[in-house]
Amino acid sequence: MRHGELHRSDRIGWLRAAVLGANDGIVSTASLVLGVAAGGAAPAAVMMAGLAGTVAGAMSMAAGEYVSVSSQSDTEKSDQRREQQELLAQPAAEQQELAAIYVARGLDRDLAARVAEQLMAKDALGAHVRDELGISHATRARPVQAAFASAAAFTAGAVVPLGVAGLAPAAAGASRVGFWGALAMALTYGVGALFGAVA
């Protein structure tokens, strides 16, 4: 009888990008809006700055996440190509290497050798990619997915301060978001007030 299990590790890539994007959207947009407001800008200009910051920030987050995760993807592909070459050049050594991994995880040597032999007979590269390199379907890099998640989350996070007329949300996020957000807003408010006073 099968039992249902709910795991979330397969979502870790886009979830990380979404959390980063939402945090950045809240902090940077609220800071921008407060800085412009502190400089004495009209409400329409404050809102325009917030909207422009939202669009620019979402595109920046998407581009940055895409480039970053693409680098991870390129590294994964390079490692897989190298592993394929090693399997073609030294299959026996690669099988011993795989067996040693299973021994280190707790199997006895005979069982580890049999497992390595059977897995390599079915899908040698897949076994090495998963067990030697630590790359699985759930954890592999997905640049496009990460870019969309980051941009969407940034936009959602940026809407929060815009929706309350340029003020920082009182109950948005956990304490770490609140701390860093407050620090960023205070510094930006100070810059706006300084230049507003000078003008």
Image (cartoon, rainbow, N blue to C red):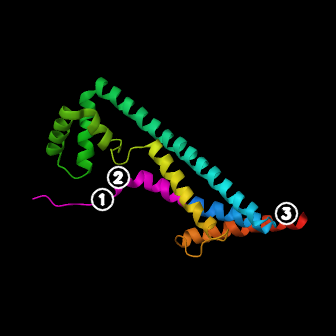
Counting residues from the start of the chain, the first of labels 2 and 3 encountered is 2
In the rendered image, the residue lying farthest to the right is 198
Residue lying at 53% horizontally and 70% vertically, measured from the top left? 173
Q: Position of residue 156 (x, y in %)?
A: 54, 60
Residue 153 in the figure: left or right of residue 97: right
Instruction: Say what amino acid the circle numbered 2 marks.
Output: Asp
Mark toward the viewer: 3 or 1? 3
Q: Main secondary structure of the magenta part?
A: helix
Residue at 13 percent across and 58 percent down: it is 2
Residue 157 in the image: state x and y as whole percent.
56, 62
Tell me the crowding category of disc 3: few under 14, some 14 to 19, or many 20 or more residues within 10 angstroms, Cα based: some
Foreground residue, 195 or 40?
Answer: 40
Mark 3 to mark 1: distance in Å?
51 Å
Identified at 29% across, 24% down, the residue is: 88
Q: CA distance from mark 2 to mark 1?
A: 7 Å
Q: Secondary structure at mark 2?
A: helix
Query: Picture coordinates of residue 11 (x, y %)?
Result: 38, 54
Q: Residue 31 location, x and y as percent?
A: 68, 64
In the rendered image, which residue does mark 1 sit on? 7
Q: Are marks 2 and 1 in contact (CB under 8 Å)?
A: yes
Left/right placement of residue 106 relative to residue 159 reads left
Q: Residue at x 20, y 39 (%)?
A: 116
Q: Which mark is residue 155?
A: none
Q: Which residue is mark 3?
A: 195
Q: Which residue is mark 2?
A: 10
Up-down: is 182 above or below 66? below
Magenta segment, which residues? 1-22
